[in-house]
Image: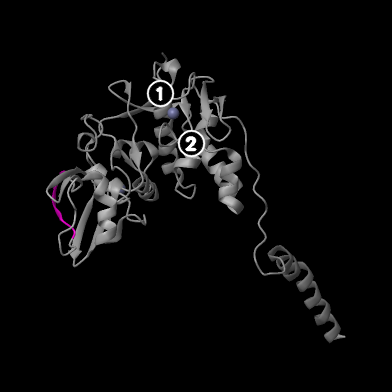
Amino acid sequence: MKKLVSFFFLLTVFLIIILPTLIARGCSGEEVRTPVEIDRSPIISPAGEITLKVFNHQSEELVEMPLEEYLVGVVAAEMPASFAVEALKAQAVVARTYTVNQMLAFGGKGCDRHAGADICTNSAHCQAWESEKSSLAKWQGEGAEYLNKIRSAVGATAGKVITHEGRLIDAVFHSTCGGHTENSEDVWSTALPYLRSVACNFCTDSRWTETQHEFTAAAFSEAIVPYVSALPVSASGRPLLEQGVRSATGRLKSVLIAGETVTGRDFRTAFKLPSTNVTWQITDKKITFTAKGYGHGVGLCQYGANGLAKQGKTYTEIIEHYYTGVAVTDIPVS
Ligand SMILES: [Zn+2]
Ligand SMILES: [Zn+2]
């Protein structure tokens, strides 16, 4: 009888406690996740509904979209969705600033390649954007969770833009600065008061912090020949690359190759290097470049923004770190 009682006791324990746990964990022993629902509640800007005309390169058509919905597709395309929420918010504000600055309704120049368009989805011309369908396919299992994260980052900053002395800034950004961001005039011709070089040791998580790129003398020659008229290697096949002119942060402004000046920008393009912050080592018939960072280095450093967010900084603090003397404000009423 005693045995029977303890048997029923154990059976009860199994049915009440152990069995539900096993069911919840599934047969493979992995925890069964309840599917995340996509929250598509409309994102309302305090400035009221603003729409813009976007030329979509995928569908080859001009479409009208609410600004905030458009920005969800921009943040999804421009920043890894795995980044911390405050970094995603900073990216949303940067993208909104860029977009509003370009909108015809706000006195911007629009996209000059597509008549009537405020902006196009070609990242090399205007700004990267991807459809919700593309984002979800890219994120696979994490899709709904990532989309909700980006929608909430855009929603939490709805209507916010970056201004300097009351005017929208040119909100440029890049992937990884590699230690210091760059002064605007050292990359382009104009010195802008809010695009100043700042220290950033927050982007060390990026795989672009430091990378190596190796070229044989023949590959070196082939890559640089379009930019020089003389043969860029010596008779013995040694690459003829001399020390360059550098900005205060170490980025190449120009280099001498076989006695000819090549700009840092052309040099980066020729060798498909991630940045102009490059040093090199030449051994017989081989050259190894060491590059720091990825991108032009001006304005917000995306990996740095993520690093700062992980340290507990807010999106406003992140923006104020990378853009000197700016304010985060509501979209100016024109
Ligand atoms: Zn365009
Ligand atoms: Zn950085």
Q: Position of residue 304 (x, y in %)?
A: 34, 47
Rendered view: 59 above or below 108: below
At horizontal 17% and vertical 62% (from top left) the residue drawn is: 238
Residue 244 is inside the magenta segment: yes
Q: Earlier in the sequence, mark 1 or mark 2?
A: 2
Quadrant of the rendered structure where residue 37 is? top right
Q: Assess whether residue 61 is covered by the magenta stretch.
A: no
Local packing at callout 2 (Cα closer than 10 Å; few below 14, some 14-19, many 20+) is many
Q: Is residue 72 visible?
A: yes
* Residue 311 % position (x, y): 36, 50
Residue 203 horizontal/vertical position (percent): 33, 51
174 above or below 66? below
Badge 1 marks a residue whose secondary structure is helix
Please, what is the dominant secondary structure of the magenta stretch?
strand
> Quadrant where the C terminus lies?
top left
> Exactly how many numbered labels are in the figure?
2
Q: What span is colored magenta in the figure?
A: 239-248
Q: Position of residue 204 (x, y in %)?
A: 32, 55
User: Which residue appears at 56% of the width and 35% of the height?
Assistant: 58
Residue at numbered disc 1: 102
Residue 201 in view, yes or no: no
In front of the other: 157 or 277: 277
